[in-house]
Image (cartoon, rainbow, N blue to C red):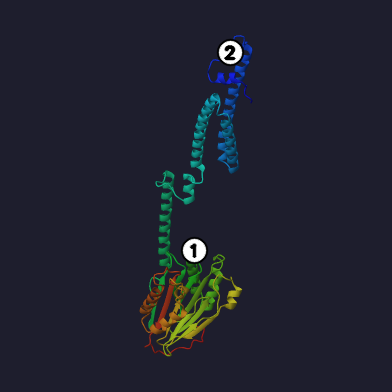
Amino acid sequence: MGAPCGPFYHTLLAGQSPNRPERLTHRPLEDTIFRALAAGLEETRLQRQRSHSLASANDMGARGDKRRRLAGSTDRRRRARLSESSDRPTEGRNREKGKEKDKEKERGTGTNLRRRHSRTGPHSTTKLRKSTGLRKAVPDGKEAAEDEERREQMEALRKDLDVASQVQVNLLPKKIPQIPNYDINAFYRPSKEVGGDYYDFLQLTNGRLAMTVADVSGKGIAGSMVMAMFRSVLRMCAAEGVRARDIMIRTNELASRDIKRGMFVTCLFTILSIEKNSLRVCSAGHNPLVLWRHASRTIHLVNPNGIAIGFDKGPIFENVIKEQKFHVEPGDRVVTYTDGVVEAMNKDEELFGDKRFYKLIKDNAEEPSGRLLNLLVEAIDQFVDGAPQSDDITILTFRRDPEDLDKAVPVDEDTD
């Protein structure tokens, strides 16, 4: 807006009384004064408007780079216009007042921005706590209650596992059979509180002793439940059957109905005829039986055909499974085991292995059965060297007395 011209206007704005002639009418003077006041008021209004625009631009600038650039441009234009009118005293005073108001608004806007930034900015306390996973040093009542509930659940689970472990131990044989001229013993150690391995002794008719070692594919509570079911079925079938193969076929037929898909049981089932010193062997996909011959001092593996129980409910299992029999000579030793023995792993992920296991049996076959088991377990523990036990370990062994020289009875009969 253009300013009135002439020295009279500048004199009036400076606060001096003009020396005008008395003949000068009041009308031009009033018009001039009004125009000057209007110009000052208009400039003040523009300054307030620009200050408001600047504050709005600053607030919007916190939301994006583009708006900050616009706010900066507006601010530069405002300063340029103010510098052009700096020689006007009244406008200078209005400009100072406007600057003070601008500063107050800027301080207010900046404070709001800082508060808003402290709550939602990239380094806010809330986001920092969430990004770093930090929690309150002192949990509130709800968190404390949840922690207490979790502790109670863990304690209840531990008690349940203790009970399950005790039940499983009670399912294992309480005593080792005492058979004339035979030294029998067994070792069992689960990898968890409850395991999936199983061994058993069953007294059959006609002076026969059934011995079995089994391994359930699952471990923990699931494996122990399947093992308990398998034990019951096997005991029932063994009481009804005569030959090892027939007992295995019937056991598979019944147990497969209750074994869920994806789980199975491997089993080595033997029947020892004490009178005839003969052994019948049937394997349902299990590790081979180790036979050490006293006469030749050599190791032999007995591993008849068979698939695991639970793979098939009938025809295939019956067609595949076979039975093998041999005579136990004086001084011979038999060892059955689960894969947790040969698959024991050390810290370098190296397996204990079959060869090392067979050599230990060969070197210590004449030791008493209990002593042999101790030597085998000590060798395994020394090999793993503190590494966590990866699987259950079960070993069953017996040896015929080398002084038992009774005449052997041929084993080609099916009555034993």
Q: Residue 411's spot in the image, x, y percent?
A: 49, 86
Q: Is residue 162 above or below residue 12?
A: below
Residue wearing tag 1: 222
Neighbour tally class for label 2: few under 14, some 14-19, many 20 plus, Cα within 10 Å: few
The quarter holding residue 365 reads bottom left
Is the N terminus in the top left, top right, bottom left or bottom right quadrant? top right
How dense is the environment of label 1, judged by Cα within 10 Å: few (below 14), some, or many (20 and up)?
some
Which residue lies at the image location 41% right of the left edge and 58% below the top edge?
A: 158
Instruction: Compare residues 271 and 140 and report the one nearer the observer.
Output: 140
What amino acid type should be assigned to the residue bearing mark 1? Ala
Using the image, determine if residue 265 lies above or below residue 54. Answer: below
Where residue 29 sits in the image (x, y, percent)? 61, 14
Q: Amino acid at mark 2?
A: Arg
Name which of mark 2 and mark 1 comes first in the sequence.
Answer: 2
Q: Are marks 2 and 1 in contact (CB under 8 Å)?
A: no
Position of residue 133 measured from the top left corner of the image (x, y, whole percent): 46, 51
Is any part of residue 73 visible from this angle? yes
Q: Which residue position is annotated with label 2? A: 20
Element carrying mark 1: helix
Which residue occupies the foreground of this view, 76 or 350?
76
